[in-house]
Image (cartoon, coloured by chain):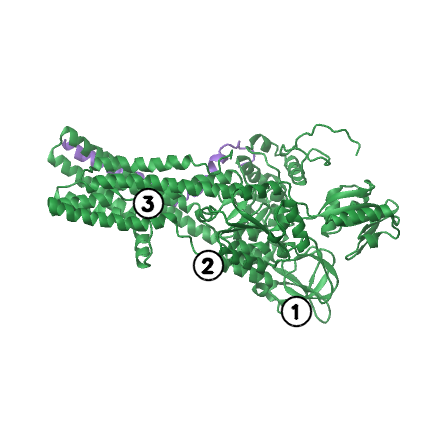
């Protein structure tokens, strides 16, 4: 069972990395508007850039 | 009219039936303009994309105020070559609207980018000031059916975004903690059944503590902070029992891990904090926006005026701030009067509907006092300034809106009242458990059971009950065109009481229209040609009545009487009965009498001095008003009319709608409206429905204010509810929905209290196990969620 100690430690590091990544997406403003971008994806790119 | 009765074809733009008597392929002028603009720019794909067709609305505003330096200073950010501003757009509905608006850069050279935020109805536009200007962009968006307003509250938005992000990070941390603690807990629970070495169990418990204490300590700070604040202010708040539960769970759990004996509840606690943060996130997204008085005033009055030099009469354009009492300003036709003052020179007519609710223009002559915010519709006048800015009547009105809005105490939320009792009951029960078990067994067992009670009764579902019910209601309402600013407004409108309705623009269309025509039908086109150039409301009604290609020359306008001109060699006079015709006839006299009897304003059309037709003008009652008021009465509301218009007109409208004369109040000033609402407040719930500046203060004073579609911006700001759909039947749907929402909230509270009673009993008797707590917590929250989704509030089929 000693392998558990190592795996658990690694898993928690992974979780911490995921939380840090999430915090980065929030702070960079990617989640400020969640209504409009899912609609924008429906447009063909005629005239939009 | 000899045309055959053809099956009505639907409007090309919105698909509604075209009203009889209207030529062409469109149901209204709005649809015609918008469809034209869409076709002109090759944007027909809009029709393939949109989800819910609706009639389009456009305005005739020039948006010249957006080019004003005072406005630009506040709202426009300049970079090296480009300028950037945030605009608020009306009537944004679906994906197609996003596409249409964001396609604008293809239509206007110099417009670089338009980014839409659908949730906030906010468009961020970037343009090249060398090539185009903000009014051009605003007019284009208006033609597409989205009326433009400056986006107020950028600072507030920034502030809120900071709070949003902070909360979202906490939500993420709590979510990760739930997942990982649950995995660790599964290991421990499995160990209970399958057997587990003591060293392994200790390791898992320590690992749980290492995750739970920092993660939850960080994520739950908002609750601790509010609870401490409430304690200091000696108020009861739901966050108090929540904080007690969280703190007790973390503290006792950590003690048990260090001691090496006793239960830990970290998995349930993490779930609890996560769900609570979700609830808080939901609530934050439906918070009420409030505007400062200064911002509102900017929207109502022009920021520049033409100042007359007292000696030379020379005109200079000055910002409104530069004016002082005893200055002389000139107000041209179509302009909004910028100050309070006295007319010194000139006679004209003013459209005062926005300020007082009177449907007909009033005539002014030298010596008459005029108010800022009213529109000069007939001829230039010179006004001697008596008050500027916040000292004007409209300024005082706006200040009172802000004051009333701030003074309105937050309602004591049902859930906070329950939370107060909850704290008392649970802490008493915990104390009794401690003492009781200390006698029966040992103080350690007593403490164990008391702590378990505090943790498992932590009222998670109670905290979710209101936000979930309100979110479902607000979301559904928004889809039906009813925008509600917050949970408070819903709770305030749930109990029936008195509903005050404004007349002009609320139960009526809000502008004069030709409702009857007696005599020569061809004369309508002649009248339209003569009136085409005038800004007078009567002229505009006649022009709308009959579109014409005829052109009038030698126009002569006489104030308060009418307009005459020459159309194709004939002399046409349109105006008051005594003025336009030199001769008369018994038929014409009978028509005039008939129309006047019905409360319509008779306008006579004379050709070469001979009267040929009489038009009856009135502000028509909305087609759905009667049904709407009957629905309100059926829901238990007492409906009263509160209008600034002539009492006789108000009573006539009231009788047409089935409102007894004693409940029809006419000639009410904006200040008196507020007083009437305040007086009624002592007798029960009061809702004010209106559309104008004159209603805004009363809306702020009432328990809830409802602004109907097409309202003045200030009324929308002051109101709690804005009806985006043109039908006023939405008023009844709104109050019915509010009542259904409150019923759902109560049902949710009963469910969650039932769960708490059950697990609380188990804890007191010492039968609780962390596994039960872990199962019950999400189960109770899911019940509340299901109950909220099943709510009848704002169901699409009522």
Q: Nearer the viewer, residue B753 or B505?
A: B753
Whole-angstrom CA distance, mark 2 to mark 3, is 33 Å
Query: Which lettered chain is shown in purple?
Result: A
Q: Mark 1 lies on which chain?
A: B
Label whose residue precedes the other's in the sequence (1 or 3): 3
Whether residue B618 sits left or right of residue B780 in the image: it is right
* SS for callout 1: loop
What shade has chain B been given? Answer: green
Q: State the residue position of label 1.
A: B327
* SS for callout 3: helix
Q: State the residue position of label 3.
A: B170
Whole-angstrom CA distance, mark 1 to mark 3, is 58 Å
Whole-angstrom CA distance, mark 1 to mark 2, is 36 Å
Q: State the residue position of label 2.
A: B407
Whether residue B494 sits left or right of residue B715 in the image: it is left
Q: Residues within 10 Å of mark 2 (few under 14, many from 20)?
A: few
């Amino acid at each position: 069972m000693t392998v558990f100690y190592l795996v658990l430690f690694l898993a928690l590091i992974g979780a911490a990395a995921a939380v840090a990544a999430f915090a980065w997406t929030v702070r960079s403003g990617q989640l400020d508007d969640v209504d409009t971008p899912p609609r924008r994806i429906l447009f063909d790119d005629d005239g939009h850039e | 009219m000899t045309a055959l009765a053809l099956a009505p074809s639907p409007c090309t733009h919105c698909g509604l039936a075209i009203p009889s008597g209207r030529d062409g392929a469109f149901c209204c002028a709005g649809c015609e303009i918008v469809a034209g603009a869409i076709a002109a720019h090759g944007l027909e794909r809009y029709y393939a994309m949109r989800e819910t067709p609706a009639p389009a609305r456009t305005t005739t505003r020039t948006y010249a105020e957006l080019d004003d330096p005072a406005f630009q200073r506040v709202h426009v950010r300049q970079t090296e070559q480009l300028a950037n501003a945030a605009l608020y757009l009306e009537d944004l509905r679906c994906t197609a609207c996003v596409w249409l608006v964001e396609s604008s850069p293809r239509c206007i050279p110099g417009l670089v980018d338009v980014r839409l935020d659908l949730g906030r109805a906010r468009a961020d536009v970037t343009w090249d000031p060398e090539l185009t200007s903000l009014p051009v962009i605003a007019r284009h968006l208006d033609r597409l059916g989205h009326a433009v307003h400056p986006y107020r509250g950028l600072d507030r938005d920034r502030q809120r975004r900071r709070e949003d992000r902070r909360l979202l990070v906490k939500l993420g941390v709590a979510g990760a903690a739930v997942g990982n603690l649950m995995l660790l807990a599964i290991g421990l629970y499995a160990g209970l059944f399958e057997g587990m070495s003591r060293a392994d169990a200790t390791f898992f418990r320590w690992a749980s503590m290492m995750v739970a204490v920092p993660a939850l300590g960080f994520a739950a700070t908002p609750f601790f902070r509010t609870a401490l604040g409430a304690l200091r202010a000696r108020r009861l708040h739901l966050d108090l029992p929540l904080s007690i539960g969280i703190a007790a769970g973390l503290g006792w759990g950590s003690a048990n891990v260090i001691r090496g004996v006793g239960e830990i509840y970290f998995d349930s606690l993490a779930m609890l904090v996560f769900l609570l943060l979700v609830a808080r996130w939901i609530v934050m997204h439906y918070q009420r926006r409030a505007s400062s008085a200064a911002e509102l005033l900017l929207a109502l009055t022009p920021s520049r005026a033409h100042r007359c030099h007292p000696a030379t009469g020379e005109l200079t354009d000055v910002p409104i701030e530069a004016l002082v009492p005893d200055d002389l300003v000139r107000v041209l036709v179509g302009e909004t009067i910028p100050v309070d003052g006295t007319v010194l020179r000139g006679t004209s007519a003013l459209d005062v509907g926005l300020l007082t609710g009177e449907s007909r223009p009033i005539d002014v002559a030298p010596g008459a006092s005029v108010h800022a915010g009213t529109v000069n519709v007939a001829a230039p006048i010179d006004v001697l300034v008596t008050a500027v800015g916040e000292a004007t009547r409209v300024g005082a009105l706006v200040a009172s809106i802000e004051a009333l809005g701030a003074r309105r105490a937050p309602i004591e939320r049902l859930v906070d009242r329950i939370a107060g009792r909850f704290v008392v009951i649970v802490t008493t029960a915990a104390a009794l458990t401690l003492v009781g078990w200390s006698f029966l067994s040992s103080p350690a067992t007593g403490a164990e059971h008391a702590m378990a009670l505090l943790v498992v009764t932590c009222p998670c579902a109670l905290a979710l009950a209101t936000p979930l019910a309100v979110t479902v209601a607000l979301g559904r309402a928004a889809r039906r065109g009813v925008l509600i600013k917050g949970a408070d407004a819903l709770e305030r409108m749930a109990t029936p009481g008195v509903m005050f309705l404004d007349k002009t623009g609320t139960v009526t269309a809000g502008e004069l229209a030709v409702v009857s025509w007696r005599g020569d039908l061809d004369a309508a086109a002649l009248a339209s040609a003569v009136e085409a150039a005038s800004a007078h409301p009567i002229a505009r009604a006649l022009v709308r009545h009959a579109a014409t290609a005829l052109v009038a020359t030698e126009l002569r306008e006489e104030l308060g009487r009418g307009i005459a001109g020459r159309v194709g060699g004939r002399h046409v006079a349109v105006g008051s009965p005594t003025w336009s015709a030199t001769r008369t006839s018994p038929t014409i006299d009978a028509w005039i009498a008939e129309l006047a009897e019905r409360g319509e304003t008779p306008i006579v059309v004379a050709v070469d001095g001979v009267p040929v037709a009489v038009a009856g003008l009135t502000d028509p009652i909305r087609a759905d008003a009667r049904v709407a008021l009957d629905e309100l009465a059926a829901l238990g509301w007492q409906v009263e009319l509160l209008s600034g218009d002539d009492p006789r007109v108000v009573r006539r409208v009231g009788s047409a709608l089935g409102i007894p004369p004693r409940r029809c109040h006419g000639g009410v000033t904006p200040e008196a409206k507020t007083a009437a609402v305040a007086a009624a407040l002592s007798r029960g719930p009061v809702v004010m429905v209106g559309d104008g500046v004159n209603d805004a203060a009363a809306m702020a004073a009432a328990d809830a204010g409802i602004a109907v579609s097409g309202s003045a911006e200030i009324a929308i700001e002051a109101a709690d509810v804005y009806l985006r759909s043109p039908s006023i039947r939405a008023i009844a749907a709104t109050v019915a929905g509010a009542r259904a929402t409150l019923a759902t909230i109560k049902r949710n509270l009963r469910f969650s209290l039932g769960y708490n009673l059950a697990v609380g009993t188990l804890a007191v008797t010492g039968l609780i196990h962390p596994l039960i707590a872990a199962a019950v917590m999400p189960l109770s929250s899911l019940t509340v969620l299901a109950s909220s989704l099943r709510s009848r509030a704002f169901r699409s089929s009522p």
